[in-house]
C-alpha cells in the first residue's frame, strides 16, 4: 500500500527538509502551496507531486485532499506549515491584515486538520503535525496578530490531540523557538550552531512520527544552544519603534 505524506505550506527551508526526509523514508510526498512554481525543483529532486491550494479556503482544502487521494493515496501523515505575519503597533494595525493572519495561521490549520482526520479515521490511524513558533507560547511587542494565530494553532493541536489519540491519530505541535538556518541566514563565526538546522528539525518530526502509541508526544520545543532570554536583555539600542536589541546569551 502506498503511504503518502502531505506537506501544506511547502517551500524552502524546513518544509523542503521534511519533504526530502519523508521521500527517503519511502513516503510518496505531496506538496501544497498557493504558488507551485517555486516547488518545481524540489518536486523533481524527490519525485513529489505539487498541488496548488490556499489552506485558508475550504474549497481549496477539500479539492487538495480529493486530488491527493486520487493521484497518490489518502495521506497518513499531514504537516501544516503555513503562517502569515504582520507587524505593527496595536493602534496602527489594519483589521483586514489581522484577519488574514488568523485565517492562514490558525483557521487554515483547522480546515486541513479536519480534512486529514476524516480520511485518517477511515484508515484507522495517522498523524497530523503542526509547525509552531516562539510566538506559540510567547507574545512579543508589535507582533500581536502572529501571536494570536500561533496561540490559536497550539490550542487547536492540544484539543484535537486529546480527541483523536484514542482513535489512533497522533497529533503533535512543534514549537520552533529560534531562527532557522537558510541560504540567506547563517551563523556568525563566533557562534557556531546558533541557528536551528532545518534537517535536524525534520529528523525530530520523523522521530515523533515513529513514537509508539503508549508514549506519544503532543508537543515538543526545539531551540539552538544559544537563546535570547528576556531576563538577560540589555538596552543596547533603542529604535524609533521602541525596539530593544537583546544580548545573546548562552544557556
Image: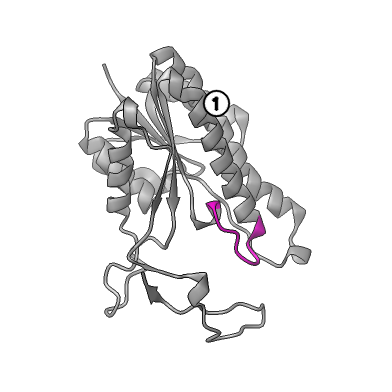
Q: Residue at x 60, y 64 (%)?
A: 140
Please tell me which residue lies in front, 101 or 220: 220
Q: Residue at x 62, y 34 (%)?
A: 57
Give residue 242's quadrant in the image. bottom right
Question: Which quadrant of the rendered structure holds the N terminus?
Answer: top left
Give residue 79's quadrant in the image. top left
Please tell me which residue lies in front, 64 or 109: 109
Residue 27 magenta-highlighted: no
Is any part of residue 144 visible from this angle? yes
User: Crowding at label 1, few (<14), some or many (≥20) Cα neighbours within 10 Å?
Assistant: some
Answer above or below: position of 171 versus 243: above
Please tell me which residue lies in front, 31 or 128: 128
Answer above or below: position of 74 versus 160: above
Dominant secondary structure, magenta: loop
Q: Position of residue 143 (x, y in %)?
A: 63, 62
Range of residues picked out in magenta: 136-144
Answer above or below: position of 133 versus 48: below
Amino acid at each position: 500500500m502506498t503511504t503518502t505524506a502531505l506537506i501544506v505550506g511547502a517551500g524552502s527551508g524546513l518544509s523542503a527538509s521534511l519533504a526530502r526526509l519523508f521521500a527517503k523514508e519511502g513516503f510518496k510526498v505531496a506538496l501544497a502551496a498557493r504558488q507551485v512554481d517555486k516547488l518545481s525543483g524540489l518536486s523533481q529532486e524527490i519525485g513529489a507531486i505539487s498541488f496548488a491550494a490556499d489552506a485558508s479556503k475550504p474549497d481549496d482544502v477539500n479539492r487538495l485532499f480529493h486530488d491527493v487521494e486520487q493521484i497518490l493515496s489518502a495521506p497518513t501523515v499531514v504537516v501544516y506549515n503555513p503562517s502569515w505575519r504582520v507587524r505593527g503597533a496595536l493602534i496602527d494595525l489594519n483589521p483586514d491584515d489581522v484577519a488574514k493572519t488568523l485565517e492562514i495561521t490558525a483557521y487554515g490549520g483547522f480546515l486541513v486538520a479536519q480534512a486529514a482526520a476524516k480520511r485518517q479515521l477511515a484508515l484507522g490511524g495517522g498523524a497530523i503535525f503542526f509547525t509552531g513558533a516562539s510566538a506559540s507560547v510567547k507574545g512579543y511587542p508589535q507582533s500581536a496578530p502572529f501571536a494570536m494565530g500561533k496561540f490559536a494553532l497550539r490550542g487547536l493541536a492540544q484539543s484535537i490531540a486529546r480527541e483523536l489519540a484514542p482513535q489512533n491519530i497522533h497529533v503533535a505541535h512543534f514549537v520552533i523557538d529560534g531562527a532557522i538556518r537558510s541560504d540567506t541566514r547563517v551563523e556568525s563565526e563566533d557562534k557556531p550552531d546558533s541557528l536551528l538546522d532545518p534537517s535536524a528539525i525534520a529528523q525530530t518530526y520523523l522521530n515523533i512520527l515513529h513514537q509508539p502509541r503508549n508514549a506519544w508526544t503532543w508537543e515538543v520545543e526545539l531551540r539552538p544552544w544559544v537563546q535570547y532570554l528576556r531576563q538577560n536583555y540589555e538596552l543596547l539600542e533603542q529604535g524609533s519603534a521602541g525596539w530593544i536589541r537583546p544580548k545573546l546569551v548562552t544557556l
